Amino acid sequence: MNTVRANPFTQHPAAVGETYLAHLRTAAGFGFQMVFAGLACLVHALLPFLFVRTGSDCIGRLHERLSARRRRY
């Protein structure tokens, strides 16, 4: 019986047309932007005159990027 197990490190990246390293760069880029936007939102919560649109602008940009990627695959 020959069973081939999918490599969990490459299965999803391949499904979206990327190598492991390309997916790592893309996902990490999204993650860092979300962390930055989250921190900006926390600062904005304390000091509402700072980072007034930073969080929502970041979400909008990430949504556009993700939507464009989904349309490709």
Image: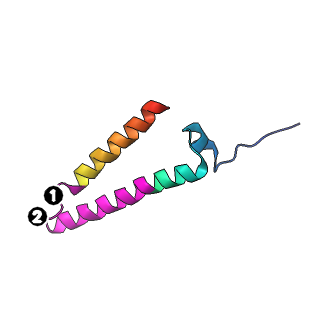
Which quarter of the figure has residue 2?
A: top right
Measure the C-alpha gap from mark 2 to mark 1. 6 Å
**Is residue 46 rendered magenta in the image?**
yes
Side (left or right) of 43 relative to 67: left
Q: As displayed, is residue 16 above or below residue 36?
A: above
Extent of the magenta region: 29-54
> Are circles 2 and 1 on residues that touch, CB within 8 Å?
yes
Q: Identify the residue position indicated by label 1 in the image.
A: 52
Q: As displayed, is residue 60 above or below residue 50?
A: above
Colour setup of the view: rainbow
Instruction: Tell me the tag on residue 23.
Output: none
Which residue occupies the extreme left position in the image? 49
Q: What kind of residue is marked 2? A: Phe
Identify the element where label 2 is drawn. loop
Quadrant of the snapshot with the N terminus: top right
How many numbered marks does the figure carry?
2
Identify the element where label 1 is drawn. loop
Q: Main secondary structure of the magenta part?
A: helix
Side (left or right) of 9 relative to 3: left
Which quarter of the figure has residue 47?
A: bottom left
Which quarter of the figure has residue 34?
A: bottom left
Q: Position of residue 55 (x, y in %)?
A: 25, 55
Q: Position of residue 5 (x, y in %)?
A: 75, 43
Q: Position of residue 30 (x, y in %)?
A: 41, 53
Q: Identify the residue position indicated by label 2 in the image.
A: 49
Q: Residue at x 39, y 36 (%)?
A: 68
**Is residue 67 rendered magenta in the image?**
no
Q: Residues within 10 Å of mark 2 (few under 14, many from 20)?
A: few
Q: Nearer the viewer, residue 5 or 24?
A: 24
Q: Residue at x 29, y 65 (%)?
A: 39
Q: Residue at x 32, y 62 (%)?
A: 36
Q: What kind of residue is marked 1? A: Val
